[in-house]
Amino acid sequence: MDAIKKAVGGNHGSSNTQSHTGGSSGGQDFGDKGAAAANQKLGGHLNNNQLEKGTDAGRNMFEKKTGTHVPSKISN
């Protein structure tokens, strides 16, 4: 469970050297955190800008196909 918390930035007690930027408020939404965790688990070959573009593209495709707006808490 600690590995999951560390991957999504929830383990504030340890030294977390990852720098997370993106989104309009400078933080990460749930979509960005999930993509970052998956990226780290798969070897970490993508940088934050690439992850942000990927989650934005996924959100745009979802909204285009379903016509449903994704809340900013999930993906901004």
Image: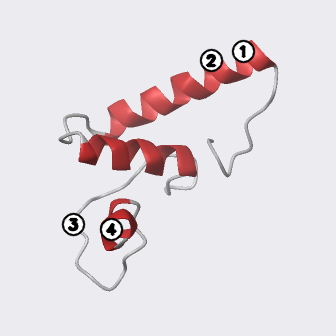
- Three-letter amino acid code of the residue under disc 1: Lys
Which quadrant would residue 43 be assigned to in this image?
top left
Q: Disc 4 marks which residue?
A: 6
- Three-letter amino acid code of the residue under disc 2: Met
Residue lying at the far right in this picture: please name it: 67
Disc 3 vs disc 2: which is toward the camera? 2
Disc 1 vs disc 3: which is toward the camera? 1
Q: Sequence order check: which comes first, mark 3 or mark 4?
A: 4
Does residue 68 lie above or below 66 as drawn? Answer: below
Q: Sequence order check: which comes first, mark 3 or mark 2?
A: 3
Q: Sequence order check: which comes first, mark 1 or mark 3?
A: 3
| Label 1 CA crowd tier, 10 Å (few <14, some 14–19, many 20+) | few
Q: How far separated are the C-alphas under marks 3 and 4?
A: 10 Å
Q: Disc 3 marks which residue?
A: 17
* Callout 1 secondary element: helix
Q: How far separated are the C-alphas under marks 4 and 1?
A: 33 Å
* Callout 4 secondary element: helix
Q: How far separated are the C-alphas under marks 3 and 2?
A: 32 Å
Q: How far separated are the C-alphas under marks 1 and 2?
A: 5 Å
- As drawn, the label of residue 61 is 2
Q: Give the side of residue 48 with respect to residue 34, left or right.
A: left
Disc 3 vs disc 4: which is toward the camera? 4
Task: Report the front residue among 24 and 10.
Answer: 10
Query: Residue placed at 53% from the left, 43% from the top?
Result: 31
Task: Report the front residue among 14 and 53.
Answer: 14
- Three-letter amino acid code of the residue under disc 4: Lys
Task: Report the front residue among 19 and 32.
Answer: 32
